[in-house]
Amino acid sequence: MEFILDYYFDIGLMGDEFDSILAGFWVTVKLAVLSGIASLLWGLVLAVLRQLPGRAALPLRVITIAYIDVFRGIPLLLVLLLLSGSLSAFAFEGVIPTWLGQPTWLGEPTVFWYGILSLTITYGAYMAEVYRAGIEAVPRGQMEAARSVGMTHGQAMRYVIVPQAVRKVIPPLLNDFIALMKDTSLVVVIGAVEVVQAGRDVQSAFFNGSGLVLAAILFLLLTIPLARVVDRLIAREQARTERGGRPAPVAGGPAPAAGQSAG
Amino acid sequence: MAKRAQTDPNAAAMAGGAGSMLTLDGIHKSFGQLHVLRGIDLEVRRGQVICVIGPSGSGKSTLLRCINLLEPPDDGRILLEGKSIAGPDADEDVDFVRRRVGMVFQQFNLFPHRSALENVTIAQEKVLGRKRADARAKAEALLARVGLADKVNEFPDRLSGGQQQRVAIARALAMDPHVMLFDEVTSALDPELVTEVLDVMRELADEGMTMIVVTHEMGFARGVADHVAFIDEGVIVEEGEPHEVLGDPREERTKRFLGLVLGR
């Protein structure tokens, strides 16, 4: 019994290895924050491209939709392996410059940047779909009102549609961010040392899982508060809508879909 | 009527001079299988107030939406201040139209994430490039004019329907439109809030604004309009002065509609 408890919660070992685990967790946090910000932006770009109007933008829309379908449909692990393998091969063969194929920006190792890139490529596609749901939830009358005061499609998106859409989807975006944070651990397959790898190193050296448990605790210290924040945001949004956040169609007659009636 | 003149392009161009604000010539619009507008001709003179009445689904809203090109017409031509904006010879684009034509919607469509003041300033700044202070001064004056001087910093969800609709009118007026389109702007309002919106519109009409008003408010049409057009099934069935169309309609369909609406 004691062995079992010790295997998971060897406090002495946790203390001894705390620095190395924390160093790993710092890498995890950097991966999560950088790729989180990058995929938030990239996802928004994709979502806006997907909504471009008119026939001229059709090819761009098709490419965007194809991109989103592909990267939502394949495992992140596969993207990591393919991207790291191909970029280093291209750089080695001189097809692309080394600074691009084997980046070491900001003093971070190449695998770190492969991780950021893969996470951004994949989570950008996820987040694009979240933004899209938000954009489509903005009543059609908003775009019409914006156009009727002379705004271009781009201005209407920027000043009217996207600000409302983003507000609606902050909770699901944060959920995606939590998922992204956990998925950063996949970068171990390309040789990056983050918190899970640090815990694994402890496990191999001491035949004890306490390092991994410590890693799990560090994750939970961030993910559980984030989950509570999401809950609170959802509750607040609900309270807002119940109070009558939308200009509800009031008494007298059925509610016509905003601006769609042919009457 | 100017209607006959419109079939001849040269005459239409002449009609587009002097006092003509807007000329519609044979406007058609379909949504898929649904042929909503089936050849609308309409002449609007500067300063005129035209009320468009008709049963729901008759094409009234679509007509307004064609005029400011929210729904480009499939066929026919539109002259705005003598310039062709829709049709084979269209030489002006959407920007030209939207800077001259203001629109107010049934559902208000205020920007919910912006205060009343910002609703009125944002397009002034972003579209017309007015300075913030100028846009603000103009917005405050317009909000005061529609009776909302004390509500400038409120957000739309804190305003009643009537107040929201008056902000929407101020928002449209801020762009200095030459024509205002009103699309059943009181239909979504509680009955006691209708008057405050109609009063604003009446003042606007008195000041000489050119207005096309799609409405079910027959009292407003009778009291304010210079001209009433009755639309049914995508065509103008009957048009003329309010006392003619509303008081002594010639067409059977007009009589039937007015009978239903006025309950007589």
Image (cartoon, coloured by chain):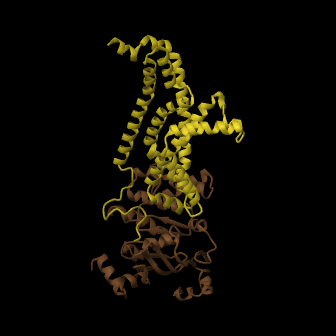
Chain A, chosen colour in render: yellow
The residue drawn where x is 34% and y is 62% is A255
- Can residue B105 be seen by looking at this rendering? yes
Q: Residue furthest left?
A: B264
Total marks placed: 0
- Quadrant of the image containing the C terminus of chain A: bottom left
Instruction: Tell me: A101 left or right of B209.
Output: right
Q: Is B99 situated above or below B73?
A: above
* Of B222 and A90, the residue lying toward us: A90
* Of B181 and A150, the residue lying toward us: A150
Image quarter of residue B78: bottom right
- Residue B15: x and y in percent read 59, 83
Write down which chain is painted brown. B
The residue drawn where x is 62% and y is 71% is B92
- Can residue B137 be seen by looking at this rendering? no
The residue drawn where x is 58% and y is 65% is B99
- Quadrant of the image containing the N terminus of chain A: top left
- Residue B219: x and y in percent read 36, 74
Image quarter of residue A26: top right
